[in-house]
Image (tube, grey):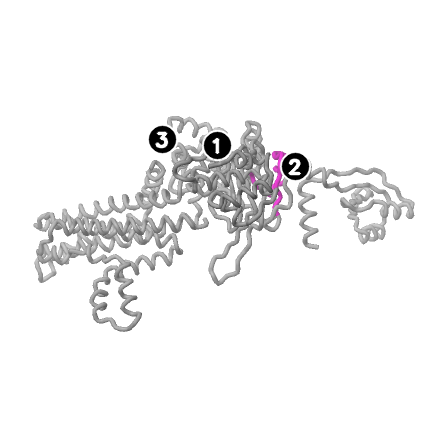
Amino acid sequence: MFSRDAKKCLNPTDANPEACFGLAKDCKILFPWFCERGRITEKIWTNAYSEAYLNDKIQEKGTKNEKPRLKKPMSNSSIEFLHVSKDYQRHFWEKKVVAVSDCSFSVEKNAVTGFVGPNGAGKTTSIKLALGLARPTKGKVLVDGKDPRSPKSRQGISYLSERPYFYDHLTVIETLRFAFRLVKGHGNSCESQIRRALDEVELSASLSSGVKDLSKGMQQRLSMAQALLCDPELFILDEPMSGLDPLGRRLFRNILRKLGQDGKTVFFSSHILDDVEALCSKVIVMANGTVAYQGSLDAILSQASGDTECEVIGLSEEDRRHLGTLGYNVTSNPNGRSTILVPAGKEFRECQRYLYGKGLFCESGSKRSASLEDILYKQQQDKWR
Amino acid sequence: MSAVYEIGVNTFKETIRNNVLYIVLFFVVMLIMLSVFVADWSVFARIQVMEDFGLATMSIAGLLLAVFIGVGMLGREIGQKTVYHVVTKPVSRAQFVCGKYAGLLTTLLLTYLAMSAVFLCTLVYLGGTIRLSLLGAMLLIWTEMAVVISASIFFSTITTSMLGSFFSLGFYIAGHLNDLLSIKLVAAKGSLYPYLLKAIYYVLPNLEHFNVRDNIIYGIGLPATYYALAFGYGILYATLFLSLACLMFEKKDL
């Protein structure tokens, strides 16, 4: 059914939009997606998903006699969002709420990716879409090249929810047995894997406790234990550190670091940006239902310059007030010194000129490197302005 | 199949550890045992009154359990988000619904068997005999329960727990009044009204098919094929409602 040219065309690296468009026009049964739109853009074509989509369509619409044998795409993305939008409308008389709007991003395999953004940015909705808990209003979500609504796509996925949702009537071991059996059936390694997971989260002592008797932090540990069962390849974690004490946070950090070192794909959302900075190599920043930034963490940190701090002796109350009106943050220290904070992007020269005019000098100065928190805070402030 | 079994076992554990079940079971057992005194006060034959009272009690208890545990269970799973624990695993939504149904039906079967045992023991104590037709009537009550549970599960996939309970109760009442519709249909006039009645008549199951209490009390025998057909009718409707529940749950955003 496929000519050599057509096969060549299916290889994203050899993509030639014009040639492929010609082929697409001729094969209306095989390429309904192209025909619907009537055009192919290079961007869409070179995306690995085009091949995955075609494979699906070919499987669906292939003729009885000929079974196309096309290789599955060798995509390096574990989760892919392609122009995904999601609206919610609880009742038909209520206004639609746009949770995610034309959102495109991909989560790289074998990397720890942080998913950050303010409340209501669309992080949890995106995670729900990736797990097939909700269906997108527009666009396409792929998990390992498969539709997340199909149970097969969830074979190697582990999920940890924002709040632990467990069956109150079960004990810790019953909960883990249930989770294990849903994935692997009655496997021999069930008990040993449960013991190992409980040891990892330091919950072995509560083996026979009822889930409802556990504190929130302990339930969170139980969530992590069930996520670690069955050795999944992809971890989708929604606020894994919430409700944990400092020891628990450290434990979870170590677990996530180890997962990253073992080559697992970890995609986790968090409000605790220190954790994201410490653990992630990639970051996806959501704002207002869209992706504000995606890429390596180093790149986003190096893009933004940090604040500059300088210490001055002999600054009067009036000077402080004046510098404040110029946009500098001045704090007085108990030892008679004052610290002037020059926000990133603001010229220091004006401040220097003022100090020089008053016969004052900077005793010491340093440039702080911008943290992820600074960057997101600034981004949010820019939006409000 | 393994996932359906696991979800079924978990649901069974959940319902068996639910206090509501034991409260209802306690009152039903008490009512059946009290029927001994009710039968004594009756001017009719004691055994007949006992049979009628016992079967009616079991039918209503089954309805209450089916509606309140059936609707509440799925609603609670969605509301408390415990469903995430299951559907984020390689388990289809249809498997989840079927597992829930299987677990619930097993619990109700065991509860029903306990109620039946008390009922039959009381009957034998009063000097009655355990007839095949009586066992047939009990089977049909259980079949009716299976239909009501499937309808409850279906309602809980499309609406809230509270509304689902009302719909399920309405479904039970309308199902028992369906016979009256056939009489109304003959006299119905107008352009739309007869069609509307006809639609309701054909869509709703006729739950009166499962009610053979009058036949038992007055000793009117029914052929074995009647029981088989009524059982098949019930299974067909239960399958239909369960399929609809799976379909609706598949489309639901959780």
Q: Nearer the viewer, residue A79 or A224?
A: A79
Q: Is residue A195 above or below residue A275?
A: above
Q: Name the element at disc 2.
A: helix
The lab-note entry on whether marks 3 and 1 share a chain reads yes
Which tag, 2 or 3, sits closer to the chain's start?
3
Which residue: 22% across, 54% down? B59
Q: Nearer the viewer, residue A145 or B230?
A: A145
Q: Position of residue A339 (x, y in %)?
A: 80, 43
- For marks 2 and 3, give the CA distance: 42 Å
Q: Identify the residue under disc 2.
A: A297
The lab-note entry on whether marks 1 and 2 share a chain reads yes
**Magenta segment:** A267-286
* Image quarter of residue B167: bottom left
Q: Disc 2: which chain?
A: A
- For marks 1 and 2, give the CA distance: 25 Å
Q: Amino acid at mark 1?
A: Pro
Q: Name the element at disc 1.
A: loop
Q: Amino acid at mark 2?
A: Leu
* Image quarter of residue A247: top right
Q: Is residue B139 magenta?
A: no
Q: Amino acid at mark 3?
A: His
Q: Position of residue A241 (x, y in %)?
A: 55, 39
Q: Position of residue A58 (x, y in %)?
A: 46, 40
Which tag, 1 or 2, sits closer to the chain's start?
1
Which residue: 23% across, 58% down? B206
Which residue: 17% across, 45% down? B117
Q: Identify the residue under disc 1.
A: A232
Asked whether the viewer can see residue A172, the reply is no
- For marks 3 and 1, give the CA distance: 17 Å
Which residue: 72% across, 41% down? A304
Q: Disc 1: which chain?
A: A
Circle number at residue A186: 3
